Image (cartoon, grey):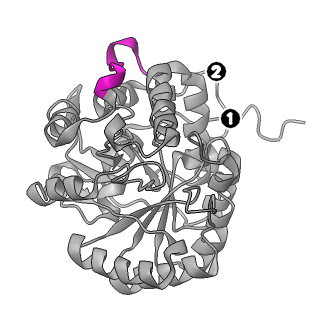
Amino acid sequence: MYTKDGEDFYIVDAHIALWDAREENQRNIHGKQFIDCFYDYHRNLSPESEVWPYEEYLYQGGERLMKDVFTDGYADHAIFQPAYLHEFYKTGFGQSEEASALAAAHPDKLTYNHNFDPRNGERGLEQLHADAEKYGLKGVKLYTAEWHGDSRGWKLDDPWAYRYFEACRELGIKNIHVHKGPTIRPLDRDAFDVADVDHVATDFTDLNFIVEHVGLPRLEDFCWIATQEPNVYGGLAVAMPFIHTRPRYFAQIMGELLYWIGEDRILFSSDYAIWTPKWLVEAFVDFQIPSDMSEYAPITLEQKKKILGLNAAALYDLDVPQALRLPEADETATGPRDPSAADPDLVGAR
């Protein structure tokens, strides 16, 4: 929990990872390229005081994660969203066994999400059933640009992907997190295009599609899709640190999201260990849309509480203390939010 000026915030970090990018786990040059790209994001978008040495960045381990995310980072709960990347790392990038064991040891603080790749066909479907039972999965994280032999990506609306989503429905895996937006070297940018979310969200209305990184740099595409698909959510991983380096760009991102998809479908994420949640939570609670960006309404205290934790808690059925809850929103499921918030000086302007 985070407290500021007498207000308490229930914090859910909806996108964290426990990775191993050390040289001994790198399968080839692409393993180094991948973690180096992560480190460039970390170094270039963090406050100077929050930048780690490169060697420290390659691996953190469970004890360090618990300190950074919970002891120092204010989180009440956090959700693992692992990337597999077996083509680049010998034991994979996200450490499934270590992360799931940590979640099992701290079920009140951690949820473990796993992953699948529909290019594994029938064998992968069998593995998904086994993984769902082993980990008690409520969600998965998908990487549509992941390499797989000669293939450099797949789409959510591929026929085999549909068979996996049908399995998710049967297994009670209702939260489908998808990396859509920024590419990471050496993956291909267009394999992270947000367009295929539209198709699958329409066909699986009983599943929640959390678009991680809100489709950046395709924010407009994401907003137009998400506003008409009420089961599409926006994850703020990678968008959050722009609050430090590009606050007006961050204000634009938040203003567009709140206008199009509303306060109930936006999830805070640090993307640990690219960044730590502490400074992001502090900065977001203090943040406000600049007064000269009057086409966007100010972000309210209630909206901040929902984004920082209550929205993710609802998706994952987390037991939020009564004192930290808020009334349910009464907005419509689709269409632009809060049209009355538009700048009256601009409405009807020609």
Position of residue 148 measured from the top left corner of the image (x, y, whole percent): 55, 62
Task: Report the residue marked by disc 1.
Answer: 343
Secondary structure beneath label 2: loop
Q: Which residue is rendered at x = 32% and y = 46% of the image? A: 17
Can residue 48 be found in the magenta stretch? yes
Q: Which mark is residue 292?
A: 2
**Residue 35 pos. (x, y %):** 44, 35
What are the residue bounds of the magenta stretch?
Answer: 46-56
Between 78 and 282, which is closer to the camera in this rendering? Answer: 78
* Mark in front: 2 vs 1: 2
* View extreme (top): residue: 48
Q: Position of residue 283 (x, y in %)?
A: 38, 25
Instruction: Judge whether 60 appears above or below 192 on screen.
Output: above
Q: Amino acid at mark 2?
A: Asp
Amino acid beneath label 1:
Asp
Q: Is residue 243 above or below residue 187?
A: above
Determine if residue 8 is in view: yes
